[in-house]
Image (cartoon, rainbow, N blue to C red):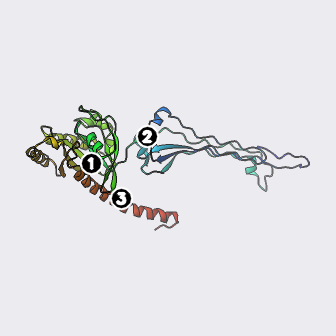
Amino acid sequence: MSFRREKYIEFGGPDGGDGGRGGDVIAEAVENQNTLIDYRYQQHFKAGTGNHGMGRQRTGAAGKTIVMKLPVGTQILAEDRETLIADMIAPGQRVVLARGGDPGHGNMHYKSSTNRAPRRADAGYPGEELWIWFRLKLIADAGLVGLPNAGKSTFLASTTRARPKIADYPFTTLHPNLGVVTVDKEEFVIADIPGLIEGAHEGLGLGDRFLGHVERCGVLLHLIDGTAEDVGAAYKTVRQELEAYGGGLAEKAEIVGLNKSDALSEKDIEEKRAALAAVTKSPIVAMSGVSGRGGTDILRILLDHIRRRRAADAAAAVPVAEAEEQEAAGWTP
């Protein structure tokens, strides 16, 4: 609350300015960022407080807004870890997580023709405060699944520039890897996750922790170790874990790769293909991540599925975009 006081001005009137609005906390999806490690070490974020209004009709400055940069594919969950607040699936997507407080009003705000000298000044309202969780689900066009040591990392290294750790013992891969595949002058992204074992959906092994990363994939490449004694049982083990996990993984398009076929005779390959054909109707391709046998064929099959999914997504996005344009123009059906 303030009144103008100057020499020779007897009735200066109210001149207390309003306060500034508090800053917002905003989440933004950005490219070239693929981890949430920064938010493990800094967990509290507070936007700036609006400045006070002052005399001489001076309005306070607004508080500084904070922008939290997240990798594309991050899900923002409420404190209960179940309620989805936002799904950051596109670069540049923004969502306001916590709005800043409303500014207070100085006595100049209440001046009227009947109240020439108001002695009222109100404080502002506090901003929003909340706890949230971030969950990253990588966005890839195709996902690699299979038992440990099925050759997933070898296949990723042979078809992309990714360099995952490769060794002859289970669970060499401890975290998801992404690689960009180029085939027929087109590119797509493929994700490799740690191998699945029986009971993975109940927490056994590592795979259940990373299955969320292949939820967004349009097609799955299921690699089977061709040197295993029972390839049909190996296939069933992984499929059972995908069904038990949920998330629509069991309904996704699937290509089965009979890997390590360079270590098998033609007769063995045919026998194992027949064993797989007895438990699945998905296409089966004999391949080898080491020698490159069948690699291009399987990539072209994956690309065909990805093309169809992209076309379907583009067709579905057109009506949504038109509805948003009509809404922005103020037209309603």
**Amino acid type shown at disc 3:** Asp
Residue that lies at the very extreme toward the right in this rendered image = 8
Circles 2 and 1, Cβ within 8 Å, touching? The answer is: no
Amino acid under label 1?
Leu
The residue wearing badge 1 is 220
Indicate the position of residue 255 as horizontal and vertical percent values.
Answer: 22, 50
Q: Which tag, 2 or 3, sits closer to the chain's start?
A: 2
Mark number displayed over residue 158: none
Q: Residue at x 33, y 61 (%)?
A: 311
Are the residues tagged 1 and 3 within 8 Å (C-beta)? no
| Residue underneath mark 3 | 313
Q: How many numbered tags mark residues here?
A: 3
State whether residue 244 appears in this view.
no
Left or right, residue 326 beside residue 199? right
Farthest left residue? 267
Left or right relative to 273: residue 309:
right
Locate residue 244, reporting x and y percent. 25, 41
**Considering only vertical position in the picture, is 306 above or below 269?**
below
**Between tags 2 and 1, which lies in front?**
1
Give whichever of 67, 306 is nearer the camera: 306
Amino acid at circle 2: Phe
Dot 2 or dot 1: first in sequence order is 2
Q: Residue at x 70, y 45 (%)?
A: 60
* Label 3, residues with CA under 10 Å away: few <14, some 14-19, many ≥20: few
CA gap, disc 1 to disc 3? 18 Å
Query: What crowding class fits label 1: few (fewer than 14 Cα within 10 Å), some (14-19), or many (20 or more)?
Result: many
Q: Position of residue 149 (x, y in %)?
A: 23, 36
Q: Mark 1: which secondary structure?
A: strand
> Which residue position holds label 2?
134
Q: Earlier in the sequence, mark 1 or mark 3?
A: 1
Q: Is residue 257 left or right of residue 194?
A: left
